[in-house]
Image (tube, grey):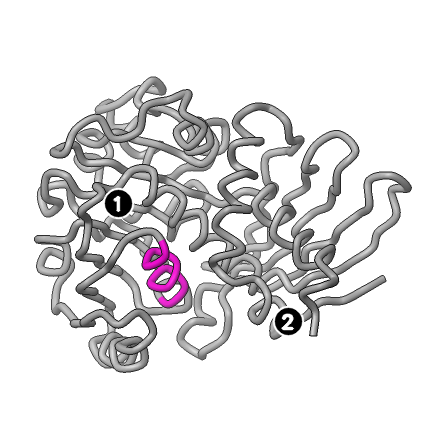
Amino acid sequence: MRFIGREEVARRLTYDVAIPIVREAMIAFSRGETKQMLRSILPLSERRLFGVMPGALGERRAFGAKIISVFAENAAQSRQSHQGVVVLFEAESGAPVCVVDAGEVTAIRTAAASAVATDALARADARRLTLLGCGEQAATHLRAIAKVRRIERVTVWGRSREKAEAFAERNRGPIGAQVNVSATVEEAAADADIICTLTAATEPILRGAWVKAGAHVNVIGSSYAGPAEIDNELVARSRFIVDSREGILRQGAEFLCAKEAGVIGDEHIAGEIGQVVAGTVEGRRSAEEVTVYKSIGHIVQDLATAWWVYSNEETRS
């Protein structure tokens, strides 16, 4: 059995590779070609979770599971918040063939999925990107979103001004765009074309009143029922696209909060991103529409990207 560590994943799983893999995986998911169970999440203590996500890429294709811990406080200590392994099984014999570092796979595939959604839902002329959060996912989203839109200005906000400034300093070079720091979320969101919420917030930090017409928002930070990053108004006013309808109906915090408040019903989910990119569900319907992509992450993204790293021998060094 092979083990593929964090450094090898980071070196080989580029966004040019990951984005099309995730796009095809989500199309297959929405077509019912993959197999998966709703993730199991075990709360260990406050802001500490243990999760198991099993699935299969389809008939006679690889299957496996991601086994992962999510410790929110790790970000403050420059450690990955998501740590664990993706275990891959070969379809013909059922044998386990590879264990892949899940922290790096998760970081890359999450940003790649947001890039797929941004490419499908954001306006073609979107140039201004706002990152709410300044941790690992902010860095991966900056690079991934730049693959699908010509970003000219980046604004970052974080609870710690010092950490936000350090993030801006580290990331002024990679995509050749101006990177500024905002003191408030409202200021950061004011003229953004694309907004990514990438925090461990337990209560909404982004309000619908602060998002301009025509903006696209990727809501990423909360991956289970409970913590919510955006308010009910933003959920209600948006064309709401999700990674998994079943997953969001069961575990999508922002959707469930708005539903409990009585401002939306289940029909507010316009479709899955796999349906949008396949052309079976309409995405953005006008230049003024606000679009939201709500992601809790999905095992088919992990399996597809991890399997690519394992199976593409010719790219190994």
Badge 2 amino acid: Glu
Q: Which of marks 2 and 1 is nearer the N terminus?
A: 2
Picture coordinates of residue 299 (x, y %)? 60, 43
Q: What element carries label 1?
A: strand
Prevalent SS, magenta region: helix
Picture coordinates of residue 49 (x, y %)? 54, 55
Mark 2–mark 1 contact, CB under 8 Å? no
Does 145 appear in magenta?
Answer: yes
- State the image quarter where residue 56 is shown: top right
For the point 32% across and 80% down, which residue is it? 170
Q: Name the residue under label 1.
A: 217
Q: Is residue 98 left or right of residue 95?
A: left
- Measured Cα–Cα span from mark 2 to mark 1: 31 Å
For the point 42% across and 29% down, which residue is it? 272
Q: What element carries label 2?
A: helix
Magenta-drawn segment? 139-147
Q: How crowded is mark 2: few (under 14 residues within 10 Å), some or many (20 or more)?
A: some
Q: Nearer the viewer, residue 16 or 115?
A: 16
Q: In this view, does 309 lie to the left or right of 89?
A: left
Q: Mark 2 points at which residue?
A: 8
Picture coordinates of residue 156 (x, y %)? 22, 66
Q: In this view, does 92 lie to the left or right of 275?
A: right
Badge 1 amino acid: Val
For the point 31% across and 46% down, which residue is it? 218
The label nearer to you, 2 versus 1, is 2
For the point 25% across and 57% down, which residue is it? 150
